Image: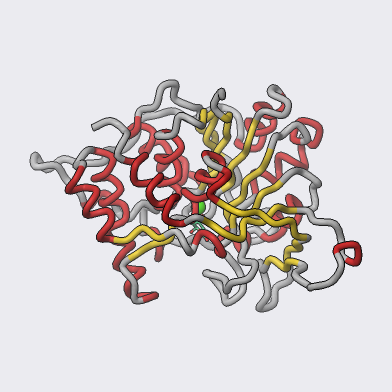
C-alpha cells in the first residue's frame, strides 16, 4: 500500500509536536505540507515551532511550512501559554548542552511563500481523492480554504479533526474543547461544508495518556535525541497537569488524530449530526451532537463520523514504538 498523503494543520503546542513526530516516524504516512494556525500560541510562534521540530527530525524530503491565520475568523485570539509554556513547547530555552549552548537552537528553515489556506487548496486540487488533512489546531485555515476554493477543497479524501467533546465535559470551559472553542465560526463553516469529516474528540483523546513514568522508562531504554526532546518538552507540562488535575500524565490529543490515519482500526466511529454553538454565552464553542434515542429518519442526516471508542493500550504502544524509531 502506498503511504497516505497528508497535510497537517497545526498550532504547536506540545502535543502538536508529538503528533508531528509520530507522523514523521510512520511509514504509513507521507507529509506533503505543514500549515500553521493561531491557537495555543500566535501563528508566527507556531511556525517557528514547526521549523524547530523539522530541524530536529530532519525528514527527507522536508515538507513546506506555510503560515496561516493570525486570529480566528471573527473573534480575538485567546492563546494557551499557561498550559504549553511561553514558547508553546514547554520553555525549551531552559535546556543547555554541557558546553552551555542552547540544546534547541533557533531554527533557520524558511517558510513557503503561499498562505496556509492557499497551499492546502492547491495540494488537494492537484491530487483529487488522495489527500487527508489532519487538523490539530483551530479550524480557521481550513474554513478560509473552503470559502476561497470550494471546488479544489471538494477533492479532499478526508478531513480528520482533533476537537470537540460529545459525551464528556470540555477542557477549556465546562462544555467546550480548546480547538473548536477558539474559532467556533470556522468550525461551523467546516461542519456544514458537506466534506467527509472524522472528528477525534476529547471522548477518545482523554483516554490516551502519556505518563511521566512511561516517558522516563523510554528515555532510560533508548536515550536518543528524539526521546530526550519528548521528555524535555513535556517536563513542565507534567507539573501543570499535576497542579490542575492531580495527575502526572497528559493526554495525547493531537497524536491520536494522526494515529487514526495511520491505523483506522484503533478507533470506533459513529455517524452523528453535530452542530457548533457560536453564541457568546456559557455554551460557546460546544459541539451539540444529536444523541437522541429516536429513529434516524427523524433526525437531520449525519455530517460527521465521530470517534467514540479507542484501543488506548494499542495506541500508546504504537506511539512509544514510533518515537524510539527516529534517528539519534
Ligand atoms: C487541543 O487543544 C490544544 O491545546 C492541544 O494542542 C489540542 O490540539 C486539545 O483540546
Ligand atoms: Ca493543537
Above or below, 63 against 267 in this view is above
- Residue drawn at point x = 62 percent, y = 46 percent: 160
Above or below, 27 against 178 in this view is above
Seen from this angle, which residue lies furthest right? 298
Above or below, 51 against 192 in this view is above
State the image coordinates of residue 229 (x, y, percent, origin top left): 28, 45
Q: Depth check: 289 or 316 in front?
A: 316
Answer whether residue 65 is visible to the viewer in this image: yes
Q: Depth check: 287 or 137 in front?
A: 287
- Where residue 157 sits, quadrant-wise, is top right
State the image coordinates of residue 313 (x, y, percent, origin top left): 42, 55
- Where residue 281 sits, quadrant-wise, is bottom right
Q: Depth check: 277 or 48 in front?
A: 277
Horizontal side, residue 269 vs residue 51: left or right? right
Quadrant where the image shows the N terminus: top right
State the image coordinates of residue 60 (x, y, percent, origin top left): 41, 22
Amino acid at each position: 500500500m502506498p503511504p497516505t498523503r497528508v497535510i497537517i494543520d497545526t498550532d504547536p503546542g506540545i502535543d502538536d509536536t508529538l503528533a508531528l513526530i509520530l507522523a514523521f516516524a510512520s511509514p504509513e504516512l507521507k507529509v506533503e505540507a505543514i500549515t500553521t494556525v493561531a491557537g495555543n500560541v500566535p501563528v508566527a510562534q507556531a511556525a517557528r515551532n514547526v521549523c524547530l521540530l523539522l530541524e530536529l527530525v530532519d525528514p527527507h524530503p522536508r515538507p513546506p511550512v506555510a503560515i496561516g491565520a493570525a486570529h480566528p475568523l471573527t473573534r480575538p485570539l485567546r492563546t494557551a501559554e499557561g498550559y504549553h509554556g511561553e514558547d508553546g513547547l514547554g520553555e525549551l530555552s531552559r535546556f543547555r548542552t554541557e558546553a552551555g549552548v542552547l540544546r534547541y537552537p533557533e531554527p533557520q528553515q524558511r517558510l513557503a511563500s503561499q498562505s496556509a489556506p492557499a497551499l492546502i487548496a492547491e495540494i488537494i486540487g492537484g491530487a483529487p481523492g488522495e489527500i487527508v488533512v489532519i487538523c490539530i489546531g483551530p479550524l480557521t485555515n481550513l474554513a478560509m480554504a473552503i470559502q476561497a476554493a470550494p471546488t479544489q477543497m471538494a477533492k479532499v479524501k478526508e478531513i480528520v479533526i482533533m476537537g470537540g467533546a460529545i459525551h464528556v465535559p470540555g477542557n477549556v470551559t465546562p462544555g467546550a474543547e480548546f480547538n473548536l472553542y477558539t474559532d467556533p465560526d470556522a468550525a461551523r463553516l467546516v461542519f456544514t461544508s458537506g466534506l467527509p469529516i472524522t472528528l477525534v474528540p476529547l471522548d477518545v483523546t482523554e483516554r490516551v495518556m502519556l505518563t511521566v513514568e512511561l516517558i522516563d522508562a523510554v528515555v532510560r531504554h533508548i536515550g536518543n535525541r528524539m526521546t530526550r526532546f519528548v521528555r524535555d518538552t513535556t517536563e513542565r507540562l507534567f507539573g501543570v497537569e499535576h497542579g490542575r488535575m492531580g495527575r502526572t500524565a497528559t493526554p495525547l490529543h493531537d497524536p491520536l488524530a494522526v494515529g487514526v490515519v495511520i491505523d483506522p482500526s484503533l478507533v470506533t466511529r459513529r455517524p452523528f449530526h453535530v452542530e457548533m454553538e457560536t453564541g457568546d454565552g456559557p455554551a460557546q464553542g460546544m459541539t451539540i451532537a444529536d444523541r437522541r434515542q429516536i429513529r434516524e429518519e427523524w433526525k437531520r442526516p449525519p455530517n460527521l463520523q465521530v470517534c467514540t471508542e479507542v484501543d488506548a493500550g494499542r495506541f500508546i504502544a504504537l506511539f512509544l514504538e514510533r518515537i524510539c524509531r527516529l534517528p539519534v
